[in-house]
Amino acid sequence: MNVAVLTFPLINNYGGIIQAYAMMVFLRELGHKPTFINLQTESRFTSFSKYLVKKYILFFLKKHRNVTLTVKDSELKRFVDTYITPQTIAISNSKELHEYFESQKFDACVVGSDQVFSKMGYSNFENDYSLGFLNNEIIKLSYAASFGGSDYQGNQDKVEFHKTNLKRFDAVSVREKSAIDVCTRTFDVDAKHVLDPTMMIDKMKYLEIFGGSSKGETRKELFAYVLDSDLSKTKVVQDFAGNIGLSVNQINDGNGSEKTIPMEDWLKSILYSEHVITDSFHGCVFCIIFNTPFHCFINKKRGADRFYSLLEMFGLENRIISDEVTDAPIDWDDVNNKLELNKIESAEFLREHLKCSEVY
């Protein structure tokens, strides 16, 4: 099947990018031909400004070589362009999105993962994530869609609109257990709890990205991937690292800081560090995938339910940081067994509703 993958526009966020990559890989492994819908959030004015820069300013610079212009290369953009393929043309607003689908012949559209159900839209794409613009011939699914909390956070005046649209879905799946209740209570639709797409593909797919090995040398450092850092979190990180004799390597997602690293280095930092402390959902996910000891802050600002749902699924509630951090061991055999069982159930959702012929 030709399947459109619709998620948030990709920004400098490791989790958002890697879940899109995993969704594409997962669908290909099930025998489909996915296409990533390349949504952009820049305004038409910004696009036109870039056009003027390219056409006139760069032409001027070629004629006057003593003038220089430094363009910061985006390693994350390179990753997206290399690994998340094929992509559509850049689509900047709802009108362009609707026109694009009208011009194509997709058999299905999968919306997700990420918090695509939080408001059922995004800047320039308001109200699009309930797929009301698609005709009835296209199979409509959500995969691991998230509300970002225990309730719908969007415009309440649009609830009936989205309810009508979601009832046209062939099936709905969500990333958090609490989202099942939101679907039933607010939108009167049934939903299935599934794994985030990043957990649906073999970890070797991630190692292949940077040519690594799961038997690489563990670094004597603590990787602190903290999106919303503050003094209290920094003290916890520094104290715990000092207690277990590790140096600290700390970054955030690149949106609030100029300190960014390539996706390859982000993956390696989780895989090879001796310990990870994070307030990121996908930071926790990749610690589980790579069997890296970790602890996490519950990031209520970005949605607490997803942490509780994930950690409860794997019996890892004790990894949540409260007053102090205790370095209790993790039973990785138990965690890995639970992961494999949940992968089977989650894969069945797409196999059934996309009529997959291959066994995952």
Image: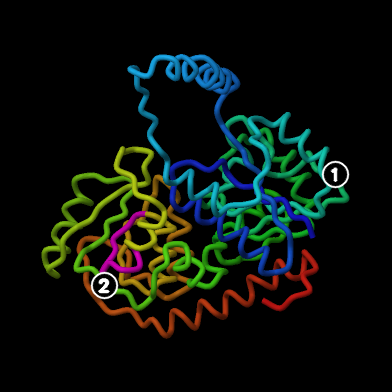
Q: CA distance from mark 1 to mark 2?
A: 51 Å
Q: Is residue 155 above or below residue 306?
A: above
- Residue 69, percent across and down? 37, 23
- Residue 77, percent across and down? 48, 43
Q: Which residues are magenta?
A: 270-279
Q: Is residue 215 above or below residue 131?
A: below
Which label sits in the foreground, 1 or 2? 2
| Side of 102 where 34 appears, left or right | left
Q: Label the magenta part by its dominant secondary structure.
A: strand
Total number of numbered discs in the rendering: 2
Q: Nearer the viewer, residue 87 or 13?
A: 87
Q: Nearer the viewer, residue 213 or 66?
A: 66
Residue type beneath disc 2: Thr
Q: Nearer the viewer, residue 55 or 2?
A: 55
Q: Secondary structure at mark 2?
A: loop
> Is there CB contact under 8 Å for labels 1 and 2?
no
Q: Which residue is mark 1?
A: 135
- Residue 307, percent across and down? 43, 60
Q: Secondary structure at mark 1?
A: loop
Colour pattern: rainbow
Q: Nearer the viewer, residue 22 or 236?
A: 22
Residue type beneath disc 1: Asn
Q: Is residue 278 magenta?
A: yes
- Residue 328, percent across and down? 25, 77
Q: Which residue is mark 2?
A: 218
Q: Earlier in the sequence, mark 1 or mark 2?
A: 1
- Residue 118: name its quadrant: top right
| Side of 90 where 56 appears, left or right | left
Q: Residue at left 39%, top 49%? A: 300
